[in-house]
Image (cartoon, grey):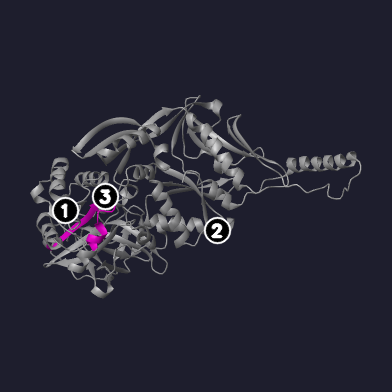
Amino acid sequence: MDLAKIRNFSIIAHIDHGKSTLSDRILELTKAVDARDMRAQYLDSMDLERERGITIKAQNVRVEWKGHTFHLIDTPGHVDFGYEVSRSLAACEGVVLVVDAAQGIEAQTLANCYLALEHDLEIVAALNKIDLPAADPDRYAMEIETVLGIPAEDILRISAKTGEGVDLLLDAVLERIPAPKGDADAPLQALIFDSQYDQYRGVVSSIRVVNGTLTAGSKLQFMNANATQEAVEIGVRRPTPTPVAELGPGEVGYLIAGIKDVGEARSGETVTMLSRQASEPLPGYQDPKPMVFCGLYPIDGDDFELLRESIEKLKLNDASITYEPETSGALGFGFRCGFLGLLHMEIVKERLEREFNLALIATAPSVEYRVRKTNGDTEIVDNPADLPPTQNIQHIEEPYFRVSIITPKEYTGTLMDLCQSRRGELGKLEYLSPERVEMHYQVPLAEVVVDFFDQMKSRSQGYASLDYELSGYRQSNLVKVDLLLNGQPADAFSTIVHRDKAFDYGRRMCEKLKELIPRQMFDVPIQAAIGGKVISRETVKAKRKDVLAKCYGGDITRKRKLLEKQKEGKKKMKAIGRVEIPGDVFISALKLDD
């Protein structure tokens, strides 16, 4: 295919600014999908995406427009899925930046725009939703010019819902986004930018050919994995997968090579011909750094192997998950998993349960701490159960986030109060326009991951937007709070918190567990402790049999004797008894902060 006739671009925007709707209109306008087969959010293939109304996975499709071939990638908008966006941008020469004409620039708009500039991509900006009564495209075009430096007259006005201006947007893509570069005669270099697992066909990889030509039936070398495979099928998504004989430089498509071992086709892998290999692999991707950690355990212990296979397959589809086996005294065998954020964690757990038919318990989310020990060593701890004894700790450092919040000015006070209550420090506050403010805070990651996003949305009636990035580690006054049931620590409930909040956490957890733990034949003390010091206590009272029921009157000493006998039995039972905790108690208790 003639390189001059190809355009590769991604659609990027803040969450809910109309990326998926714009993709639908482009599919209709280019007649890629029959009108009778068309449905809303056509490229969002997961039920979860449709239910929540968000894009979780980047999706690519090939369409034809005015004699040219467009490769379009629809990307997620939520900050937790930023890694999906960065991977998609590596397969493009330009982006369409979509901004809501009724809301203007949001935090993720800025983050995604800077990401595109880092990749040195051409940006075509468009104001969407101009059909809304609240739309003010002129004002927000000036805001985009002021903040991002894109001339207001170059910004297109479109409505993805009605289709108005979408044809002009495609023309602008044709004119402004450069054609890809590549040498068809050079040795093959193709980049895998996404993969998914098909139980019948093995691994299906999304691929961008940079140099050379990929032909069906050829022997391939996967350079990073050092594995040899045969190209069983290559093709393009129109959006229905359509097999083709070959893919040339600049083209985007899919590759099926009969791979069963999911480790061979990771995102960032370079594919070349076995007979004529490229001298070096393509740069690939920087591994994402997980921010939030939690333990995932099967409710049925026999499902452990199924969980291992399921996480392996899901990691192929979502390369940002990390996992390693761990054991818990309370929950048995499971995995310690790392995620990019709390929404990411929630989505992964739900996908494992739905797609692989698992029932899982997730422990309380925690973050990665640096522990400086008294002997001078530094240890990385992401599981509270692994924290060294207090006497061996010199100090603990916790990760801080650089948080950027964009909000209408009337919500500034309530959002500043939220950040300050989460131990945040104000960096700077600047006005993007007379009505909109951008606030920069330094906030501990542990305070952001719990319910910061939900609180921010409720305090700003949904208008504020959030973007964040890691800024480094700082020393903090942190302690580990243990929960003891009948004197035995329940490691699933252990957590690391700031000393000022430890008492409150311990009290709430004890109260919650008192409600949830079923009564035993003996008193069960529930204690929250820091080291050897108990900071809160509740007691689940014992079930009692009425041993005096058979005494009709008679001497008091006989009744007292029976009660003493029962008391001795309870004492003995408490010494040897174990508290059996049903799985749903863990689920309910760990939703303490929901």
Q: Residue furthest right?
A: 554
Amino acid type at circle 2 is Asp
User: Toward the viewer: 403 or 461?
Assistant: 461
Q: CA distance from mark 3 to mark 1?
A: 13 Å
Residue 257 appears left or right of 101? right
Judge the density around disc 1: few (<14), some (14-19), many (≥20) Cα neighbours within 10 Å: many
User: Toward the viewer: 582 or 398?
Assistant: 582
The secondary element bearing badge 2 is classed as helix
- Dot placed on the residue nearer the N-terminal end, 1 or 2: 1
Query: Where does residue 530 sit, x and y in percent of width and height?
Result: 56, 31
Judge the density around disc 3: few (<14), some (14-19), many (≥20) Cα neighbours within 10 Å: many
- Dot placed on the residue nearer the N-terminal end, 3 or 1: 3
Q: Residue furthest front?
A: 553
Query: Where does residue 132 sit, x and y in percent of width and height?
Result: 20, 56
Amino acid type at circle 3 is His
Reading the image, the residue beneath label 2 is 303
User: Toward the viewer: 371 or 402?
Assistant: 402
Q: Is residue 328 above or below residue 528?
A: below
Q: Are marks 3 and 1 in contact (CB under 8 Å)?
A: no
Residue 465 appears left or right of 515? left
Q: Are marks 3 and 2 in contact (CB under 8 Å)?
A: no
Q: Residue 126 has which mark? A: 1
- Dot placed on the residue nearer the N-terminal end, 3 or 2: 3
Reading the image, the residue beneath label 3 is 14
* Residue 14 drawn in magenta: yes
Q: Which residues are magenta?
A: 5-23
Q: Given this view, does label 3 or label 2 mark the residue nearer the observer?
A: 3
Q: CA distance from mark 3 to mark 2?
A: 38 Å
The secondary element bearing badge 3 is classed as loop
Q: Is residue 189 visible?
A: no
Judge the density around disc 2: few (<14), some (14-19), many (≥20) Cα neighbours within 10 Å: some
Q: Is residue 423 above or below residue 18?
A: above
